[in-house]
Image (cartoon, rainbow, N blue to C red):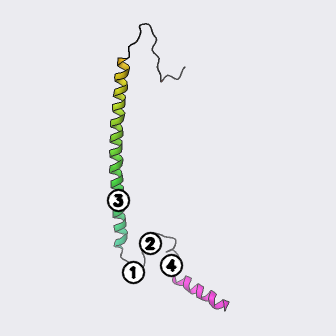
Amino acid sequence: MLFLWALAFLLVLHEQDPLAAADPVSVAPGSLEGGSWCNEHMLHERLDIIEEKVIKTVEHLESEVKSLLNIISETTSNIPTVPGTPLIDIFDDTS
């Protein structure tokens, strides 16, 4: 009886394509090849939407950075300095 089960198991394995399980993108038998084109087209549409959102986000962040730099520039130009006071560079690492 065990021999019959083993033989049936081997026959089932023989009927299946051994690479079909390893390839998750493979097209099922009897289906049209157009399905992969459709999936690829949808993927490109999603990537285009993501790209558009990234570009808008980068433009918004650039605008914010320019605004902040203008505010900092205006603030530092309006700070009254006492004559004879040395200017301190906050970006200097030698301190």
The residue labelled by disc 1 is 30
The residue labelled by disc 3 is 44
Q: Residue at x 59, y 85 (%)?
A: 9
Image position, residue 5 (x, y; %)? 62, 88
Q: Earlier in the sequence, mark 1 or mark 4?
A: 4
Figure check: 76 above or below 5: above
Asked if labels 4 and 3 touch by Cβ distance under 8 angstroms, the answer is: no
Q: Secondary structure at mark 1?
A: loop
Q: Earlier in the sequence, mark 3 or mark 4?
A: 4
User: Residues under labels 2 and 3: Cα distance?
Assistant: 19 Å
User: Residues under labels 3 and 4: Cα distance?
Assistant: 30 Å
Q: Amino acid at mark 1?
A: Gly
Image position, residue 3 (x, y; %)? 66, 90
The residue labelled by disc 4 is 17
Is 10 inside the magenta-drawn segment?
Answer: yes
- Indicate which disc residue 2 carries: none
Q: Earlier in the sequence, mark 2 or mark 4?
A: 4
Q: Amino acid at mark 2?
A: Ser
27, 2: nearer the viewer: 2
Image position, residue 67 (x, y; %)? 33, 31
Q: Amino acid at mark 3?
A: His
Image position, residue 30 (x, y; %)? 39, 80
User: Residues under labels 2 and 1: Cα distance?
Assistant: 12 Å
User: Residues under labels 3 and 1: Cα distance?
Assistant: 26 Å
Q: Nearer the viewer, mark 3 or mark 4?
A: 3
The residue labelled by disc 2 is 26
Tell me where the magenta segment starts and ends, as one range.
Answer: 1-27
Disc 3 crowd, CA 10 A, few/some/many (<14, 14-19, 20+) = few
